């Protein structure tokens, strides 16, 4: 490992990442491992988490990356994961609330089910339970541990749609009537905006105990989406493109380390300039 500026050095600290087997979750794990953290990669299914941890160790030889099962919407599972992480590693110093149900834009014959007029209450409750309530439960448990053990960092993964509304024209399909056009579901914006509100609350709640809380609001990441969608979205971004999957690593490292020691309650928007238009 190359020499690091002390402010970015997380050696001796333990970081827990929720929903870490997903596209960006894996990147958050690698980012933290790269600056020396012992990383606990968690996901709903232990086998999935262990497979992702093995891949991360292969990508970052020598990194200390372990796996735990964690259902963020279940208070008992959250408590068990905290107890396991503390028993295994001696404590937790960083929590990255990344877990979410990806609110897909429907493209099949049930397009209208994603529209606000017909949005299912059960779906609303499931997605909010994971993306927002889950962040609350994890912050409550892990944050309390940090506040009583010398401090730490909570980082909530929001979205550029925490500060701007979805442009539903991105998802429009020619030939469909307005009431059947696909849309970005309401849950996504509500959850991501809620995470920013949670961040601000946490930043003041445990400030005296040395716990900092921030959010990151990434823009869209290119992951093989249809060309038409990529072209439409890129046209709304001043930098003219979607993000690469690894372009948020440095922000994660900054906000989870002492390099950001005087930053709390902040929502760092990294969207290629889209939200400033």
Image (cartoon, rainbow, N blue to C red):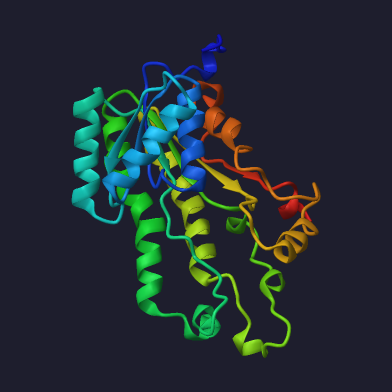
Residue 110 drawn at (x, y percent): 51, 84
Q: Residue at x 28, y 37 (%)?
A: 144
Residue 71 drawn at (x, y percent): 28, 52
Using residue 273 as the reference point, say whether residue 223 is left or right of it: left
Front one among 4 and 48: 48
Q: Residue at x 24, y 55 (%)?
A: 74
Front one among 89 and 254: 89
Count the marks. 0
Front one among 83 and 70: 70
Farthest top residue in view: 3
Residue 205 drawn at (x, y percent): 38, 41
Q: Residue at x 53, y 71 (%)?
A: 185
Residue 117 drawn at (x, y percent): 52, 85
Q: Quadrant of residue 91?
A: top left
Q: Residue at x 73, y 82 (%)?
A: 174
Q: Quadrant of the C terminus?
A: bottom right
Whether residue 232 is visible here, answered yes or no, is yes
Q: Is residue 60 above or below residue 123?
A: above
Q: Is residue 103 above or below residue 272?
A: below
Using residue 32 as the reference point, say whether residue 184 is left or right of it: right
Using residue 106 as the reference point, say whether residue 137 is left or right of it: left
Whether residue 256 is visible here, answered yes or no, is no
Q: Is residue 23 above or below residue 162?
A: above
Q: Is residue 84 above or below residue 76?
A: above
């Amino acid at each position: 490992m190359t020499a690091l500026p002390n402010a970015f050095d997380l050696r001796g600290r333990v970081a827990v990442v929720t929903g870490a087997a997903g596209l960006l979750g894996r990147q958050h794990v690698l980012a933290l491992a790269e600056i020396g953290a012992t990383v606990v990669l968690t996901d709903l299914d232990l086998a999935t988490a262990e497979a992702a941890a093995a891949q991360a160790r292969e990508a970052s030889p020598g990194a200390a990356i372990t796996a735990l099962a964690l259902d963020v919407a279940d208070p008992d599972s959250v408590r068990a994961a905290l107890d396991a992480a503390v028993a295994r590693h001696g404590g937790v110093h960083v929590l990255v609330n990344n877990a979410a149900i990806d609110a897909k834009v429907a493209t099949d014959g049930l397009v209208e089910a994603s529209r606000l007029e017909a949005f299912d209450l059960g779906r609303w409750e499931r997605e909010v339970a994971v993306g927002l309530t889950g962040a609350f439960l994890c912050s409550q448990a892990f944050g309390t541990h940090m506040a009583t053990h010398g401090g730490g960092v909570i980082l909530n993964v929001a979205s550029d749609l925490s500060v701007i509304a979805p442009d539903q024209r991105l998802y429009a399909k020619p030939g469909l009537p307005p009431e059947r056009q696909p849309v970005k579901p309401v849950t996504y914006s509500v959850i991501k905006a809620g995470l920013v509100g949670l961040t601000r609350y946490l930043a003041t709640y445990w400030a005296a105990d040395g716990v900092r809380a921030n959010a990151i609001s990434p823009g869209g990441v290119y992951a093989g989406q249809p060309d038409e969608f990529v072209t439409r979205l890129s046209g709304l971004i001043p930098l003219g493109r979607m993000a690469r999957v690894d372009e948020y690593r440095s922000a994660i490292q900054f906000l989870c380390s002492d390099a950001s020691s005087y930053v709390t309650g902040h929502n760092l928007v990294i969207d290629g300039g889209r939200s400033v238009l």
